[in-house]
Amino acid sequence: MRAKPSDPDRSAARSAARSAVAVSVAALITAAALFGALVPRAAALEGPLVNNIGIALG
């Protein structure tokens, strides 16, 4: 059997789709890393912030 000649439009579409997936995965990894880095800081600030609000209202 002979191999079918590749369709340039389909090849370009596949390449674009792979690039979009790669960018999406990279964005998810970056977001997860930022979230992981910021959550401990937010948790550390939450206690004093809630205590200060309680003191101000009380």
Image: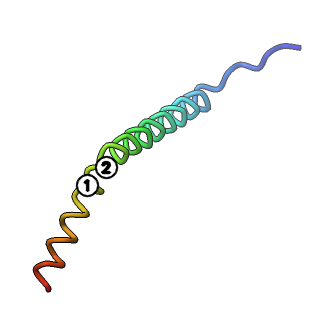
Give the SS element for disc 1.
helix
Residue identified by numbered label 1: 44
View extreme (bottom): residue = 58
Q: How crowded is the residue under tag 1: few (<14 C-alpha within 10 Å), some, or many (20+)?
A: few
Compared to 32, does 7 lie above or below?
above
Horizontal side, residue 43 vs residue 19: left or right: left
Q: Are marks 2 and 1 in contact (CB under 8 Å)?
A: yes
Query: Residue 43: percent from the left, percent from the top?
Result: 30, 57
Residue with the mark numbered 2: 40
Say which mark, if any, is on residue 36. none
47 shown above or below 54: above
| Residue 46 picture quarter | bottom left
Amino acid beneath label 2 = Pro
Q: Secondary structure at mark 2?
A: helix
The residue drawn where x is 59% and y is 25% is: 8
Q: Amino acid at mark 1?
A: Ala
x, y (%) of residue 16? 50, 34
Q: Is residue 55 left or right of residue 37?
A: left
The image quadrant of residue 32 is top left
In the picture as drawn, the residue positioned furthest to the top comes out as 2
